Amino acid sequence: MLDQLYIENIAVIEKASIDFSKGLNVLTGETGAGKSIVIDSIHAVLGHRTSKELIRSGAKSAFVSAVFRNLSASVLKRLSELSYTPEEDGSLLLQREIREDGRTVCRINERPATVSILRDIGSLLVDIHGQNENYGLLSQNQHLRYLDQMAQDEGALLEYQNAYTAMRSTEKQLKSLQMDEAEKARKIDLLSYQVEELENADLKLGEEKDLKEKRAFYRNSEKLANAVGEATDALSGGEESMGALSELETAAKALEEVQNLPQAQQLSSRLSDLSYELEDCLSELQNLSEQLSYEPEDVEKTEERLDQLYRLGQKYGPDEETMLSFLEKAKNELNQIQSADEVVAELNERLEKQREEAQKLAKVLSNLRRDTAKTFVKRVRKELNFLDMPNVEFEVEQLSAEMEMQGIDRVQFLISTNAGEPLKPISKIASGGELSRIMLAIKCVLADRDEIGTLIFDEVDTGVSGSAAQKVGLKLWETSRGRQVLCVTHLAQIAALGDQQYFISKRVDSGRTFTKVDLLDREGRVEELARITGGGELTPLLLQNASEMLSRGERKKLALTKQG
C-alpha cells in the first residue's frame, strides 16, 4: 500500500506531501491544477520513463519519494533476490531524483538502485491504469495477456515456452548445417587448407618471442665478438705485444728478487694476486668467445621462421595462442561439415521429438485458455451489467495460429454494444466511455489474480456520466475493499464514494504557479462536490445537494459492506 508520497519541484508542484490511506482515495480539482502531475510523479518514482522537462522551471532537479507498507510476499521475495531489505518497521522507501543534465539518482531504503530496479519493484507494488491502458485494450496481444492472467497459467506457459525455445534452437542448428554441395565443397577446401597450413607450421606457445631474442643476439653478435676479441688480446697478447697478463707476471717476478726492501715484496705479492684474477678473466673471455660463435645458416633459419610466423599471423591472428585457437575451431568446423549428414539426421530426429512435445504443451495451454475464457466472459459480462452496460455482449474469440512464443492461439475480445448487433472486435466499435468501463470491468475481474496492493485509475470516468458514473464509483469502492485504490476523477458521483478525498488546487504568487494537495474533511468534501456539480458559485442548494450526495454514497457503501 502507498502510505506517503512526497513531491518536490515537479512541474507546478514546488513541494507536496500526501498521506494516503487504505480503501478508495479520490483526487479532485480544477483542470490544470496538477492532478495528472501527481500521477506522473508516481510514474517517475516507480521507474517509468520520464524527462528532465518535468523539472519545475528555475529548479536544478526534481525529487519524488514514496513509502509503501504492508508489503506482499512477492515484493519481499523480489527485494531479497535483489539484495534489498525492508526497514525495521516493514516499510519500503523508493526515491528518485531527476537532474537538469538528464541524469537520474535512484534509491531503495537509502541504498543506491537503478531505474530498471525501481521499475522491477514498482511493477509489483502499483498497477496504474490510465488512458494509455484503455487504448491498449484495442491490442490483441493485450487480450491474450489478460486471459493468461485470469488463467494463472504461469507454469503451463513457462513449460511450453521452454519446449518452444529448445525446438527453435535445434531449428537454428539445422539451418546452419544446411548448405548446397558447391558451397559445402568450397568450405571443406578452405578449411582443409587452413588446418593443413597451421598443423604443418607446428606452432608452439612463446616461440616467436624466443626467435626475436635470438635474432637480436645474432644482429649484435659481431660487435660483441670484436669486443671480446680485443679484450682477450689485451690480456693474452699477440704478435705486437706481450699482453697485460704476461707483463704483470714479469713485474711481479722483478720485485720478488728485491730481498732487502719489504715494500717491494708486498707489491710483488699484490701483483701476483692480480695476475691470478686476470687469468680467470681471460678464461671467461675465452668461454664467452665460444658462446658467440654460430653458423650462418642459424641466422637464416631464424629469419625464415619469423617470416613464416608473420605471414600466418596476418591470416590467423597476432600470436601463437590466437592461431592455435583458430586451428582448433577450423578442425571442429571441418569435422562438423564432413560429418554433417550424421549430425543433420540426429538433429532432425531431435527436432521431431521437440516439435511433438511443444505442440502437446501448446494444446494443454490452449485448452486451459479456452476453459478460462468461459469463466472470464461470464464475470466480465456481470461487471459490465453492473456498470450500466446491460445490452453489451462480450465474447473471447480464440482461433488457432502458427506456433510461436506465446502458444498456438490468436485471441481477441469481441463486443456488441447494442442489442441485435453482431459481435465485432473492440477496436471497431467501442467508444471512449465504453472502453473505460470495459477496462474497469476487466480490472475488477483480474483484481484477485495478483498481489499488487495499490491500483491507480487516472480519469477512468472519461465518457461516463449519470447513473453509469455512480456505478463506476461503486465498482471502484468495491475493488478497494481488498486493496488500496487511488482514483483521479472529474465526477462528483465517483468522488462522493471515496473513503478519503484530496483536493488539488493551484495559486499564482509573484508570477509563479504553485500547486498544493489537501485532505478534505466532510465540510471540505461537500464544498468540493458542490463545485464539481455546479461549476460556479456555491449556492445553498448546491451545498445541500452535495451533502445529500455524500450521505447517499455513505449509505450505499454501508449497504454493500453488509451484503459482502
Image (tube, helix red, strand yellow):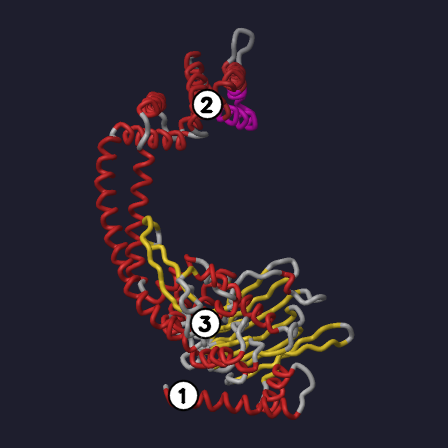
Q: Which residue is drawn at 43% across and 30% down?
A: 319
For label 3, the residue is: 440
The residue carrying pointer 1 sits among few (fewer than 14), some (14 to 19) or many (20 or more) residues within 10 Å by Cα, namely few
Q: Where is residue 299 in the image (x, y as percent from the top left)?
A: 44, 15
Eyeballing the image, is 367 above or below 351?
Answer: below
In percent of width and height, residue 358 lies at 26, 50
**Residue 405 coordinates in the image, percent (x, y):** 35, 52
Q: Residue tagged by mark 1?
A: 561
- The answer to whether residue 43 is above or below residue 278 is below
Nearer to us of marks 3 and 2 is 3
**Which callout, 3 or 1, points at the residue further toward the start of the chain?**
3
Amino acid type, callout 3: Leu
Residue 490 sits in quarter: bottom right
**Disc 2 target residue:** 310
Q: Is residue 23 magenta?
A: no
Outermost right residue: 510
Q: Can residue 247 be seen in this view?
A: no
Q: Which of 240 and 45 is in front in this view?
A: 45
Structural distance between the alpha carbons of marks 1 and 2: 87 Å
Q: Do the residues labelled 3 and 1 touch (CB within 8 Å)?
A: no
Asked which secondary structure carries label 2, the reply is helix
Q: Is residue 51 visible?
A: yes
The residue segment tinted magenta is: 252-273
Q: Distance between the residues labelled 3 and 2?
A: 72 Å
Q: Which SS class for mark 1?
A: helix
Residue 216, numbered label? none
Asked if the residues shown at circle 1 and circle 2 are in contact, with their CB atoms under 8 angstroms apart, the answer is no
Question: Callout 3 environment at 10 Å: few (<14), some (14 to 19), or many (20+)?
Answer: many
Q: Which of 202 and 137 is in front in this view?
A: 137
Per the image, label 3 sits on a secondary structure element best described as helix
